[in-house]
Image (spheres, rainbow, N blue to C red):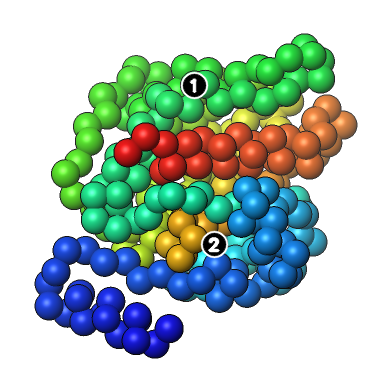
Amino acid sequence: GLLRRFACVAALGFGLAATVLAAPLAETLEGATPAELQSLRDGATLMRYAESPDALRLLPRGSEGDYVGRAAAARPAAFLVECAFLVKGTSLAGDDRVRAFNKLTEVESLAPVTYYSELRDRQTPLFRDPRRVVGPGATEAVAHVGVAEAPTSAGFDLYFHDANFGPSWFRVEIDGGGSGFTVALTNSRPLGIALLRAFPAGGLRMRFALVPVDEGVLVCGICAAEPSPGTTLLVDLWSAMEKRLNAVKGWVAGRIGGDR
């Protein structure tokens, strides 16, 4: 309650070990129903389609959720999906914060992420050969270097071979200026299917808010897509976005909730 929050603020004021303010899940995710909140506590993932940025209701309270909401409204998309899940048994304070940042920047760990392919009737890698590169169009790997203290912001370019879209380049931006983190992934070059340009540069965007709550770390995200004409004839956009949100969701959960 109020006394607990006062104690946290006092600790920060006196320069003690880093303390991240947290609130109960129900207070942080105000747009969720009681049944949805219980589902999150039970380990389920909430996933829903939104007709517009105004219809998003799985955004957490605080600066991280505000960022995701602003990002969705700044460039409205034809397709918009949101998700939320809870990672128990971890935090974003002290050593856990540095560990989470370093894990989220180890992009090579995206390689084992898979999805179920109806065409192949098996689990299939979604992102092959992921690596940091110097910029869009480059393929030579840049070594990952861990940090001893999580910076307030960081950005890098990511290359991988997408199961649907082939060679892909994304810009990744991580911000840790608040009590949690925001993670942004935006395609920096057009994405294609065969000879068709499926998405223009900036046409496929994922935004995540990682927020400390009493129960662990709440992760809320959106996937916004602006497909080129004709793309929906070749790709089930809803399924493609849901798969990517689920894949990145599982990766994030494994990164921040893995071995400590």
Query: Going 75% across and 54% down the picture, which residue do you hit?
Result: 48
Query: Going 29% across and 58% down the picture, which residue do you hit?
Result: 93
> In the rendered view, does 220 fall on the left or right side of 103?
right
Question: Whole-percent x and y of residue 101?
Answer: 32, 45
Q: Is residue 3 above or below residue 224?
A: below
Question: Whole-percent x and y of residue 170?
Answer: 48, 36
Label 2 sits on what residue type? Val
Residue situated in front as seen by the camera: 40 or 195: 40
Label 1 sits on what residue type? Ala
Q: Dot 1 lies on which element?
A: loop
> In the rendered view, does 214 fall on the left or right side of 204?
left
Kindly identify which residue carries mark 2. Answer: 68
> In the rendered view, does 177 fall on the left or right side of 12?
right
Query: Going 35% across and 71% down the picture, which residue do you hit?
Result: 21
Kindly identify which residue carries mark 1. Answer: 111
Q: Could you tell me which quadrant the C terminus lies in?
A: top left
